[in-house]
């Protein structure tokens, strides 16, 4: 059995509205980041991979198994949806045991596994707490725990860090990286920082299409020569946002230091070419793909 | 293992507690008083047992007297869907009734007027309704009127009255030929109670009669609550993405619901059995009847209501399941025909036998009763299978349920 996900020419419709356009992706073992704006089609793709949505056409195989064999796919996949919770009156370990039972695990192995997994996600102390009493970060970690309870070969996590504080977010990213050592982990997010900290392989999605696929370094190198910094008077900011893609801004009194993505050298007196970061590279990718990413509100 | 976890979930739910409370309440308020007094060959007289002769010679004069009295006051007592309704006809329809009375009695207009003048007038209070009534006796009956034609006329009158009247042909015997049992017949009832029902089966039937009323509707609350619990807890996708087959999951949940909801019934049966043991020490009651009769009688109720609740909740919503079940229950209850003992139809969902006695009447239709229970058990299993199909479709993203109201309503034209 191979350990990769292959997606070939996949299209998906909601009624008459097309949600995925001719998606082609190959995802290998390790962390894979799916980056895109809200509404880009990431969740649709994730649910399709988790056998929770039907594709219209194309082929998907998960570790050699066609996606149509939903039972087998679900057995080898752990899925953490974007918006989820668990029965609030259940205790943490009970919720895991329940979901483990739904995954066909036997009682004896399940108890041991629950203890291990709670330790892994640092929830041992919350073992007997009710789900309703957990913080947002704890709930997310419990979410990962439920996705891992049956030791899946593929882990699909959809926007897992949304709403987490910085400390929890870092802890969560580290956990995902650890988990990716021996399985495929697909991280779908619109937060560039999450991808930057965890993924080597990424794909960028927008409006149901894959705009770009490759490594983080390749994406950054594509943006080389197109990212500038400049000091401008704050009163010119609205005009600047209209003309350029502004990816960062630090204000000091009347002036602001801005980071700009541009095809050509900006027509600004003190613009300096600078090293792109992933955020700027992502914005540049969207820009050259024809997406409207300028910050003006007009 | 999954089964016990599902049971635990149900035990913890508020709807299950409410369910238990309602079953226990029904048990203690309606059935328990029946266990106040031991039935003996002398106390059975106080039950005022009646029999239905069903003889046309008894039915026709009584029905004609009643109909004539109603015609004079133009107030007809009807129970469409079981609720009392005083029907007042327009002059054209009331004249039609008069025509039928003349056809049956052979009286002419003048004789009718004289009869009215000679009849006493009174107000009869039924519940909160006060009805006008003429007390008419001994209206003559034409000699050549056959019972067949009489029933036909009564059927037409019932239609004019909108149904549910005292003159519905099937109810004529019960309404107009009831008479008290003789002492020998009452003793026969007692013998049946002791020797054939072995006491406990009779109480089992009565217990089933009362609990059957609530069990024809309230299991829907627990079923709807369990089915929609995943969605309410935002846990549906976590469950959908598990390995378990939809068939196994739905059947496990169904079995857990049926078992947990049978427990309060079992408790009631146990209390009944204990009380019978205590009350009838010398009569050697066979307490198995207190369990087997409610088991056969009530399990299909729990199963069907649960299955329908699950199915409709998956298809539409929990609210819709409760609404549909209540409507079905209401119609079933209202369509229950008199008397409330003896005959149980093949498709009567809410089976009634509101008496400790009349065993022979019950046994006369026992095969229909068994057919009835097997039919509803099969219907329940069919509904569970349909639930499995709907769940599988929803789980795979091929169906999202039918929304009747709001912005996602299926009745709204898609933009």
Image (tube, coloured by chain):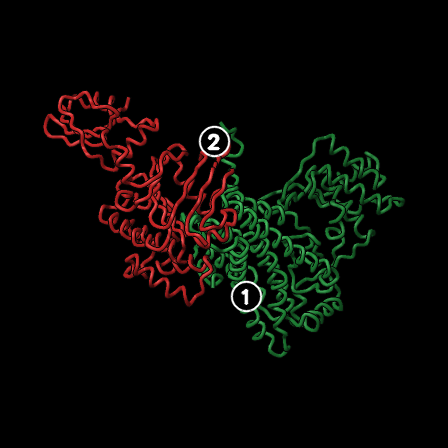
Which residue is the extreme one toward the bottom? B282
The numbered dot on residue A17 is: 2
Crowding near pointer 2: few (<14 within 10 Å), some, many (20+)? few
Decide: is B118 above or below B176: above
Cα gap from disc 2 to disc 1, whole angstroms: 54 Å
Lateral position of residue A47 relative to residue B75, left or right? left
Residue A255, percent from left and from top = 12, 26
Residue A84, percent from left and from top = 38, 47
User: Which residue position holds label 1?
Assistant: B266
- Residue shown at 67%/55% (left/top)? B375
Residue A11, percent from left and from top = 48, 36
Chain A as rendered: colour: red
Lateral position of residue B144 relative to residue A261, left or right? right
Within the image, what quadrant is residue B91 found in?
A: top right
Residue A121 seen in render: yes
Q: Which chain carries label 2?
A: A
Q: What element carries label 2?
A: strand
Which residue is the extreme one toward the right? B144
Q: Compare residues B347 and B84 and report the one nearer the observer.
A: B347
Chain B as rendered: colour: green
Residue A22, percent from left and from top = 45, 35
- Residue shown at 24%/21% (left/top)? A243
Q: Compare residues A164 and B35 and report the one nearer the observer.
A: A164
Residue B11 seen in render: no
Q: Which of marks 2 and 1 is in front?
A: 2
């Amino acid at each position: 059995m191979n350990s990769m996900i292959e997606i070939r020419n996949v299209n998906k419709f909601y009624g008459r509205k097309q949600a995925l356009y001719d998606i082609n992706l190959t995802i290998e073992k390790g962390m894979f980041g799916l980056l895109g704006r809200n509404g880009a089609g990431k969740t649709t793709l994730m649910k399709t991979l988790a056998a929770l949505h039907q594709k219209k056409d194309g082929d998907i195989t998960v570790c050699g198994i066609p996606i149509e064999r939903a039972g087998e796919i679900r057995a080898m996949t752990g899925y953490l949806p974007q918006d989820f919770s668990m029965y609030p009156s259940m205790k943490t370990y009970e919720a895991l045991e329940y979901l483990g039972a739904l995954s066909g695990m036997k009682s004896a192995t399940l108890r041991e596994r629950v203890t291990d997994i709670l330790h892994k996600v640092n929830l041992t102390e919350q073992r007997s707490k009710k789900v309703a009493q957990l913080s947002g970060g704890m709930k997310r970690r419990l979410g990962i725990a439920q996705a891992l309870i049956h030791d899946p070969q593929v882990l699909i996590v959809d926007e897992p860090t949304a709403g987490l504080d910085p400390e929890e977010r870092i802890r969560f990213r580290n956990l995902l990286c650890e988990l990716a050592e021996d399985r495929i982990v697909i991280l779908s997010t619109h937060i560039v920082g999450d991808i930057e900290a965890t993924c080597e392989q990424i794909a960028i999605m927008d409006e149901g299409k894959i705009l770009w696929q490759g490594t983080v370094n390749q994406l950054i190198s594509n943006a080389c020569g197109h990212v500038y910094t400049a000091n401008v008077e704050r009163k010119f900011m609205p005009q600047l946002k209209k003309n350029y893609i502004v990816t960062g801004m630090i204000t000091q009194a009347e002036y602001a230091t801005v980071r700009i993505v541009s095809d050509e050298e900006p027509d600004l007196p003190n613009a300096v070419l600078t090293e792109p970061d992933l955020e700027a590279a992502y914005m540049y990718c969207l820009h050259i793909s024809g997406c409207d990413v300028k910050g003006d509100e007009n | 293992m999954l089964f016990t976890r599902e049971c635990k979930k149900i035990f913890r739910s508020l709807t299950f507690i409410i369910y238990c409370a309602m079953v226990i309440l029904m048990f203690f308020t309606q059935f328990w008083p029946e266990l106040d007094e031991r039935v003996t060959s002398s106390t059975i007289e106080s039950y005022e047992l009646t029999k239905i002769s069903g003889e046309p010679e008894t039915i026709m004069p009584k029905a004609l007297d009643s109909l004539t009295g109603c015609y004079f006051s133009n107030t007809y007592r009807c129970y469409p869907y079981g609720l009392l309704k005083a029907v007042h006809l327009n002059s054209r329809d009331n004249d039609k009734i008069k025509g039928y009375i003349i056809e049956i009695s052979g009286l002419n207009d003048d004789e009718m007027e004289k009869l009215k003048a000679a009849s006493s007038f009174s107000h009869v209070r039924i519940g909160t309704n006060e009805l006008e009534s003429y007390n008419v006796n001994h209206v003559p009956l034409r000699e050549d009127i056959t019972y067949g034609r009489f029933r036909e006329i009564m059927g037409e009158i019932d239609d004019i009255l909108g149904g549910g009247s005292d003159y519905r042909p099937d109810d004529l015997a019960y309404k107009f030929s009831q008479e008290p049992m003789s002492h020998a017949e009452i003793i026969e009832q007692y013998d049946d109670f002791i020797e054939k029902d072995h006491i406990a089966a009779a109480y089992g039937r009565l217990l089933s009669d009362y609990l059957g009323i609530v069990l024809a509707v309230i299991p829907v609350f627990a079923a709807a609550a369990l089915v929609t619990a995943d969605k309410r807890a935002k846990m549906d996708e976590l469950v959908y993405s598990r390995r378990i087959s939809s068939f196994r999951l739905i059947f496990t949940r169904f079995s857990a619901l049926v078992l947990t909801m049978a427990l309060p019934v079992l408790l009631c049966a146990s209390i009944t059995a204990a009380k019978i043991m205590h009350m009838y020490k010398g009569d050697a009651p066979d307490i198995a009847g207190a369990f087997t009769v409610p088991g056969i009688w009530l399990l299909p109720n729990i199963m069907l209501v649960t299955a329908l609740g699950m199915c409709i909740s998956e298809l539409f919503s929990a609210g819709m399941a409760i609404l549909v079940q209540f409507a079905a229950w209401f119609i079933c209850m209202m369509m229950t025909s008199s008397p409330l003992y003896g005959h149980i139809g093949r498709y009567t969902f809410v089976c009634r036998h509101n008496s400790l006695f009349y065993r022979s009447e019950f046994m006369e239709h026992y095969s229909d009763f068994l057919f009835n229970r097997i039919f509803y058990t099969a219907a329940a299993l069919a509904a569970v299978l349909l639930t499995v199909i709907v769940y599988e479709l929803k789980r795979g993203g091929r169906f999202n349920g039918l929304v009747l109201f709001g912005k996602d309503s299926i009745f709204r034209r898609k933009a």
